[in-house]
Image (spheres, grey):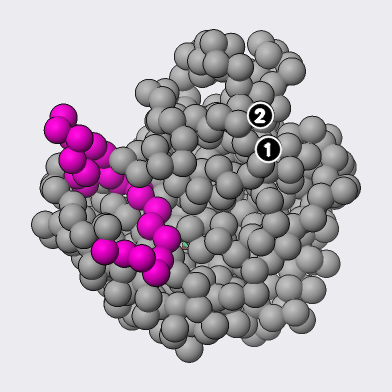
Amino acid sequence: MNILLLGSGGREAAIAWKISQSPLCSKLFIGPGNGGTDAFGTNVDLKPTDFPAIEKFCRDNGVNLIIVGNEDPLVAGIRDYFAEKMPEMLLVGPAADGAALEGSKDFAKQFMQRHGIPTAAYRSFTAETIEDGCKFLETLKAPYVLKADGLAAGKGVLIISDLKEAQDSLREMLGGMFGKASATVVIEEFLSGIECSVFVLTDGHGQYRILPVAKDYKRIGEGDTGLNTGGMGAVSPVPFADAEFMKKVEDRIVLPTVNGLIKDGIDYRGFIFLGLINVGGEPMVIEYNVRMGDPETEAVMPRIASDLLPALVAVAKGDLADVKAEEDPRTAVTVMAVSGGYPGSYPKGKLMSGLENVTDSLLFHAGTAKNEDGQLVTAGGRVIAATSYGSDIPSAAAKSFAAIKAIDFDGKYFRRDIAADLC
Ligand code: AMP
Ligand code: GLY
């Protein structure tokens, strides 16, 4: 079959790597892709939120399946668009009603409350209820967690230790700090624990498969210090997410989520990303996303031993019953190389070299491009990820660090402590 994968990050590179290996894959297009995804298919100049252009491309190129990598097109209703214009198209990703699990934190919290899914206590406020919000903050213990309701490019969560500062931030958020995204603000109880990411594929009819669990490293600095980033590395599996913990995740979170969607009349066909926190052995939901994580995908895809494409087709068709999802028993560790200055401003267009010296790791390009001379250059904050297998975390991590060291570009930075906390 002919497949169009939408997105341009390391996540899409890892998905492209995985599905290009499937005997079911005839042609793979990546729209727009990056400087490395053309190793697995054909990059096409498409914007993932330009639905009419995507439709035209699909008609012209006989695309049978669309896989949506990032959240924006899902929240903007790409599934709804194709259901109307090209109902025969298979598509992996929820319609706008399901994508609201990521697109609106208030909706996600109400969903969890309605279906008894463990999460932090919360209340939501708008400009009309600012004073109530300030009083509510006084009833909570520090630190205070303030979340913009809508999509804010991963920047919409503030964690503040001072009450007065939290009240001021609430006023600023409701005053338009994140534009429309913070017209509603969720204030919630702070949860203390270690986080992990659980990925579920579900078909809208009660069948689901839990994919390999991962942990990502969000802060720019070693020892989890400094600013939040899109993610500096990942590891899979996660030692504390053992069988007992995962049984709790399945019973208390996955099943009520999958069944809750059905009860609410939401035909959800796609990935559900559960951002979880382990609070004294009990899993609680920090957030839902409606896509795979980045860079978790770069560690998760290599750990899926079975062919993923039949599972994605089954999800799109709404029947996962006969599909297997097998795990590779090895550990995978992903280390991300980023541009100097990231997550603040950073230069682009730096020449990259040394990739050919990496033989023991998988390389997933993220912010890379080819310049006019066909040379590989940096084109984003997160530039390239190296994923390696090992029998344990230290052996996998050592290979990924060596791979990232072998790659050169001006300003390269990476964290040397990815997964070290779990050893
Ligand atoms: P989110 O965008 O919802 O993933 O939030 C970003 C990060 O903020 C999460 O990955 C957590 O590290 C942190 N966070 C969010 N909500 C809470 C909470 N209720 N308690 C503690 N940390 C939180
Ligand atoms: N790594 C976290 C995310 O993709 O949102």
What's the residue at 62%, 36% (across, down)? 25
- The residue identified by callout 1 is 24
Q: Is residue 208 shown above or below 50?
A: below
The stretch in magenta equals 357-378
* The label number, if any, that marks residue 365 in the structure image: none
Q: Residues within 10 Å of mark 2 (few under 14, many from 20)?
A: few
Q: Nearer the viewer, residue 40 or 5?
A: 40
SS category of the residue bearing label 2: loop
Q: Position of residue 181 (x, y in %)?
A: 45, 38
- The residue identified by callout 2 is 1
Q: Is residue 69 shown above or below 199?
A: above
Q: Is residue 103 left or right of residue 257?
A: left
What's the residue at 78%, 66% (across, down)? 250
Decide if residue 360 is in sight here.
Answer: yes
What's the residue at 66%, 29% (across, down)? 1
Q: Is residue 390 left or right of residue 23?
A: left
Q: Position of residue 261 (x, y in %)?
A: 79, 44
Q: Amino acid at mark 2?
A: Met
What's the residue at 48%, 88% (across, down)? 423
Mark 1 or 2 closer to N-term? Answer: 2
Q: Is residue 399 left or right of residue 353?
A: right
Classify mark 2 as within 8 Å of ligand 2 or not, answering yes or no.
no
Q: Are marks 1 and 2 in contact (CB under 8 Å)?
A: yes
Q: Nearer the viewer, residue 192 or 309?
A: 309
Question: In this figure, what is the number of numbered marks?
Answer: 2
Q: Residues within 10 Å of mark 1 (few under 14, many from 20)?
A: some
Q: Position of residue 402 (x, y in %)?
A: 30, 74
Q: Residue 406's quadrant in the figure?
A: bottom left
